[in-house]
Image (spheres, rainbow, N blue to C red):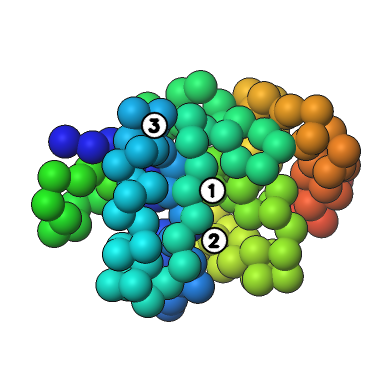
Amino acid sequence: MYWWNCNDFITLYRDKEATKDIDFILDYEDYKLFDEIEPEVSKKHEAPIDYFVGGWIVGYKLPEDFREESRKVYLDLKNIEIYLISLPDLAITKILAGRPNDVDDLGKIFRNHPEIRRDALEERFGLLKIHKTGEGLGYEGKFTSFLNEFFPTS
């Protein structure tokens, strides 16, 4: 049985009607298998697929406990387990990507999930491992600016 963690399935959180692509976070041992079947999966679901290995996204690594914080999704997929990363972790991936559609997604997520708190986001962000390439992308500034906009302090 393969453990795959699906990132961009905001549709499964019911915060988006459709997704343009499907993002997977794979364990190292699943990488070769997935690399072989990815074109078939992408064609079948008519969506481009991106995958990230070992919790590394673009210039940063999710907190070490992202798997434990994830929740299982029950889909009819033979021999594959799918997990959604936690809402705070998903929000952080969207904040750091910073594309206009990500900001729209975040607005929906925060409206539909008021339980997501600023301090929880700050805690999860503090657990990221930011690679040298991520430092050049200004993740800390992007994250702080976003928090100040969406969660203004008094």
The residue at which mark 1 appears reads as 90
| C-beta proximity under 8 Å, tags 2 and 3 | no
**Label 2 vs label 3, nearer the camera:** 3
Residue 70 appears left or right of 122:
left
The residue at which mark 2 appears reads as 109
Q: Residue at x 84, y 33 (%)?
A: 135
Q: Which mark is residue 74?
A: none
What amino acid is labelled 2 in the image?
Ile
| C-beta proximity under 8 Å, tags 1 and 2 | yes
Q: Residues within 10 Å of mark 3 (few under 14, many from 20)?
A: some
Q: Secondary structure at mark 2?
A: helix
Q: Residues within 10 Å of mark 1 (few under 14, many from 20)?
A: some
* Residue 117 screen position, x and y as percent: 61, 42
Relative to 74, residue 117 above or below:
above
**Label 1 vs label 2, nearer the camera:** 1
The quarter of the picture where the N terminus appears is: top left
Residue 131 appears anywhere in the view: yes
* Residue 130 screen position, x and y as percent: 72, 28
> Which is more N-terminal, label 3 or label 2?
3
Residue 16 appears anywhere in the view: no
What amino acid is labelled 3 in the image?
Asp
* Residue 142 screen position, x and y as percent: 83, 47
Q: What is the distance, in whole Å, between disc 1 and disc 2 at their CAs? A: 9 Å
What amino acid is labelled 1 in the image?
Leu
Residue 33 appears left or right of 67:
left
Q: Which mark is residue 27?
A: 3
Residue sticking out furthest to the front: 36
> Which is more N-terminal, label 3 or label 1?
3
In this orientation, which residue lies closer to the viewer: 34 or 54? Answer: 34
